[in-house]
Amino acid sequence: MNNQDQINNASDAVIVAENVTKTYDTGRIKVTALNDVTLTVDRGEMVAVMGPSGCGKTTLLNCLSGLDEISSGTVKINNTELSTMSDKVKTKYRAQRMGYIFQAFNLLPVLTARENVEMPLLVSGTSAKDAKESAENALDLVGLTDWMEHYPAELSGGQIQRVTIARSLVNTPEIVWADEPTGNLDSENAKDVMKLMIKLNSENNQTFVIVTHSDEVAALTNRTIFMRDGVIESDSK
Amino acid sequence: MDTIFGAPVTSIALTLFIIFAIIVIFLAYIIARNSILVRMAFRNVIRRPARAGLIISGLMLATAIISIAFTTGDSVTYSIKNEATSALRELDMFITIDEESELWANQPLPEYFDEKLYQEIKAEFEADPDVESTLADLSKTVAVINATRRQFEINATMIGVDEQNSTKFEALYDELNQPLEISDLGPNEIFIDIEGAEALEAEVGDEIQIALGPNQLTPFILKGISEGYYFKGRGSSIAIMMPLKRAQDLLGEEGFLSGVLITNNGDPYEGVKYSDGIEERLGDSEVLKSNGLKIVPIKADLVELANSIGSLFVTFFTTFGLFSIGVGLLLIFLIFSMLAAERKSEMGMARAVGMQRQQLIRLFMLEGAIYGLGSAIIGVLAGIGIGLLLIVAASNIFSGSSDDFNLSGNVSSISVLTSFLLGAVITFATVFFASWKISKLNIVRAIRDIPDPQGTGRTKSNLIWSLILTIGGILLVISSFSSNQFPAFIFGLAIIPIGLSLFFRWLGLSQNIVLTGAGVVLVVIFVLPASIWDSLNENWTDNFASFFITGTFLVTGAVLIFMNNNKPVLAFFVNTLGRIKSIAPIVKSAVSYPLRYGFRTGLSVAMFSVVIFAVLVNSMVVEGFNSLLDDRERFAGGYDTIGYVLSDLNPIKNIEEKIDSTEELSFITDVSTFRTVSDTEGLVVDSNQTDFITTNITGVDNGFMESNKFRISLATEKYITENGFDSKAVWEDLKNNPGLAVVDSGMIPTKNSFAFDSENDNLTLDVEELFIENDFMNEVKVTIRDLESGSEYEVTVIGVLDQFTDNGPILPSGIFTSQKFLFDRTGINSDATRYLFRVEENYPDPSVAIESGLFEHAIQTLDLEETLIELQSQQRSFFDLLTGFMLLGLVVGIVSLGVISARAVVERRHAIGVMRAIGFSKRNVLLTFIGESSFIGIMGILIGIILGIVTGINVMADIRDSADPDIKTIIPWVKFALIGIGAYLMSLITTLIPALQASEVAPAEALRYE
């Protein structure tokens, strides 16, 4: 069974967070970035997380995706609690079943567009030949067939972000985590990127969690969570 | 040491001090004017203490190498001075017969002078304020037996001294500290010094016999064993002391002296400083000049020798350390470039808020000065430590060969100061240059940390540099043909392609293409065999500089090719190692990152390559020369044992008869005789030489000329054969044609000065176009003046002895001709000075048996088989030590990898977060970072090995063509593998910590880092 079959056959609640608290201890002061957050995201949902700077949006995304450890509470992905997973298992899980899109600096500068997209497949053990083929298909999907041998420095901001999307989707992940995916883009490019994500979301039933400052981006999703001071202030579908 | 590279140490230190003072004043000015810069510089240094430590350890290396060279030089100087002073004790100078005095021009050179002169000499010398005392003496080398204990020694100095003055010269005491007076000795009593007594196992009351002539053993009673002595001859371990009159009686030289000993004021260490003044005041005094006498400032001469040998060591170690010093400076540049890269945004920000470019330069200068000062101090201390360790190791290596010489560590304050100043000044200079270079930044790009665009290359500086390098290179090449300087030629040749590449770049050609082109041309130039360059000019003269130039540019070329063709390199790795599924992503990242950061990777690869290159070429040359010693016949000429005649008291009149009549010598199957006359001067006919110069001439017997296997490495055209020269024919002609001669290779000028020869005061055949490297030579006529007989005669030199042989202990230096001819011309049938023996195969310890059988003739022997083995082992150990010293340069490469890895962790924190996010495990990140430094290290090592082997093969072929057809090309694979693997493992140690840090980076935290 491949990832797509798993997505189609799995139960509805893909992300379940209960009473999640995240505190940063700098040694001199303690900062509570997330305070008792409880949240459920269903499969195929496209969720926007909004809020002012420093409200805990990125921390929420990092904690839900397993990139960061939580101080208390539980996070379950597909009914598996993240805290029970070893770092090794979590890493493998990320490589095989999650995709990430970040605001900037999100491609490895020394690899070409194709090589960047191949990376998640190679680390999860796909053969070089298959990885190459899948990467080319993914880049084709985002309209970058002619740019696949270019390095990030030779691409525009929109192109970079499309490469990132191709990379996040190349292993057909169940969940795509996006942190300000349009933050560095002009409005035209931002629109194109969002259209692409919506298309993939609807075609593949993949779950998207998007942290954004942009009302336009949030308007294109089917659910918006608004945060302030580490707590969810509103959650509207 | 007084001089280094020919310049006085004090002048060097003073010059460096002035430069250092200017730097310090300039820095003080910056500090006074910009207190904020000082604060920033200090905080930058202490911001990351571990990194600061790594930087200082990298920066200190150039200083450490210099300090090592000084420490070894100082230690050697000190050891020789110390040995000389403790051996000569109170003796500073002596007066003896002047062989060059015109008084002896037409008469035999006397061995002694009239005792009556002593009072006159004493009056004149003791009136000098710096002379403490004088002592008339008559001394002779004798063989001696302790009849009571049945022990004998063949090299003892018998010395008779004027008992009235002996105590004033040096007070002797026995082991109970009771004074011993020469005047107390009875007619058959002697004193022996404590070391001599130990050698003879003698005790007071023993019967000591002195061998004074054929079957003439004179018995004495040992009356006292003294703590000191007046004088001991060269290599002598025993001083036998008696009254002057008794010695004169024994030797049959009543009323004669062999010398007057002089001790200066002050203790044995201080007195030597007065010698120059005394010699200046009294050297030309009437009593000396009119009687054909001279002053020999023996202690001052030995101190001077110690200084020149010490300087030679500094030159030797500095020269062999040149590559390490060079890469040390590269590392300083790399470190500062990386510091600048790390702070690019900060610097951009500082410039944006109003900091001037000059202030930025000053900020880096201050920071660099802190590092530079720290590293110079630590470098000097580290250098002293390593230098002393080298001395201990060298002392162990040579401990077996000389009983008398002890190598001990010593460092002089002037050397410490000079190496500190030298290290600090070159570090500051590199830091200042790097600061100037990195301050040129674009503010916006710096703030946004965007890489600088490659540009079209059409810049004014590219054009100017291209013209300077190309035209400069062409001019150097042209001028080298008239100066015959090969290093200038290849340096000129090397900078032309670099200049041209800048020109093509200015024309707009791609950087990759022009730099690859320059790299290819450089590699081709430096891997071409030397014979190609020799065909352009047969008269090239060469020295170590060409090796340094070859290494530098060959590695530069290879690295330029490597770094400017990263796609094929990457493709190679991806298509080989990258095919292994589990490491495919690691390989891709580990190779891509270094190739992307070409400048720092290229520098690090070059650091590894150049050091490995130098070590390998050196090792191949050493192995090649060492293997020559396997050819026992060539080294020893087919002989087994050599016997040196130490005393002329009891010469062997007919060695064959002596052997036949001595049963215990019946194992000797053949013997040849050398008669070397040292009181000889030579003048090369038809040369620029105007005065006669000291030389030796050795008369060899017919047996030697008929049967020796020593080779001739250069001869006149008629002796040329397919395989070099017909040595047998040369020796045969020498035998049959009186007046023909061969000379040792040291008398022939050389085009190459790789051997670090010290100055030669003896005769050389300085004839136009005559070099040891020639294909053949023309006959050279030399007028010989025999000082003993006063006669003059001419010899015709037709050949030169094998360079390999005459560096050994067997053959004396100078000119060789037939004994019969020598006798005919001088009328003196001089005694044998050296015997060469062949013995029955597998006879045990022949040299001991010969020494014993010829005891009364004072023959000291040397087993040539044993000597060879010892020589080979010493050579190997010494060059292993040198290899170890050269490998210190690898520390630079290793530190550079550490610095790069540490920088990479900081620089790529966000990328590490991305990698972790997309599925790289901690292990993968760790392996990626280790892979990166492994890639750089292994590439550097491989390039070094390949270039080293290719160059080594070329060098050996060149040596085979020009110097020695028998030398073999030996590639010590095991040694190379050990060096390569060792260097790689060491590099892993410095990169492991940054790699571990990278793997432990928390992904979410890293993703926040921008």
Image (cartoon, coloured by chain):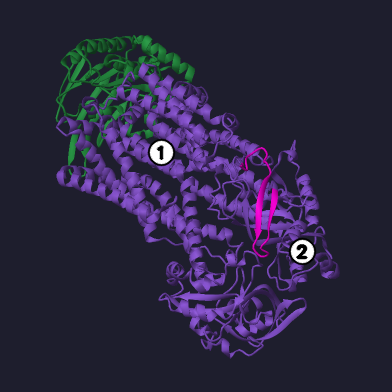
Chain colours: A green, B purple
User: Is residue A105 depicted above or below B868 in this figure?
Assistant: above
Q: Which residue is drawn at 73% across and 73% down?
A: B650
Q: Where is residue B44 in the image (x, y as percent from the top left)?
A: 24, 42
Q: Position of residue B392 (x, y in %)?
A: 51, 60
Q: Residue at x 28, y 15 (%)?
A: A156
N-terminal of the two: label 1 or label 2?
A: 2
Q: Residues within 10 Å of mark 2 (few under 14, many from 20)?
A: many
Q: B727 or B523, which is in the foreground?
A: B727
Q: Position of residue B196 (x, y in %)?
A: 61, 77
**Does the image show residue B816?**
yes
Q: Mark 1 lies on which chain?
A: B
User: Mark 1 highlights which residue?
Assistant: B897
Query: Could you say which quadrant of the image residue B536 lies in?
Result: top right
Marks 1 and 2 sit apart, C-alpha to C-alpha, by 58 Å
Query: Could you say which quadrant of the image residue B649 lies in?
Result: bottom right
Side (left or right) of B583 relative to B834 = left
Q: Which labelled disc corresponds to residue B932?
A: none
**Would residue B116 be counted in the magenta stretch?**
no
Q: Which labelled disc corresponds to residue B846?
A: 2
Q: Residue at x 38, y 41 (%)?
A: B329
Q: What residue type is labelled 2?
A: Pro
Q: What element carries label 1?
A: helix
Q: What element carries label 2?
A: helix
Side (left or right) of B524 relative to A15 = right
Find the magenta span and give its range: B770-796
The N terminus of chain A lies in quadrant = top left
**Would residue B790 be counted in the magenta stretch?**
yes
**Does the image show residue B939?**
no
Q: Position of residue B405 (x, y in %)?
A: 56, 65
User: Is residue B761 depicted above or below A139 in this figure?
Assistant: below
Side (left or right) of B672 relative to A216 = right
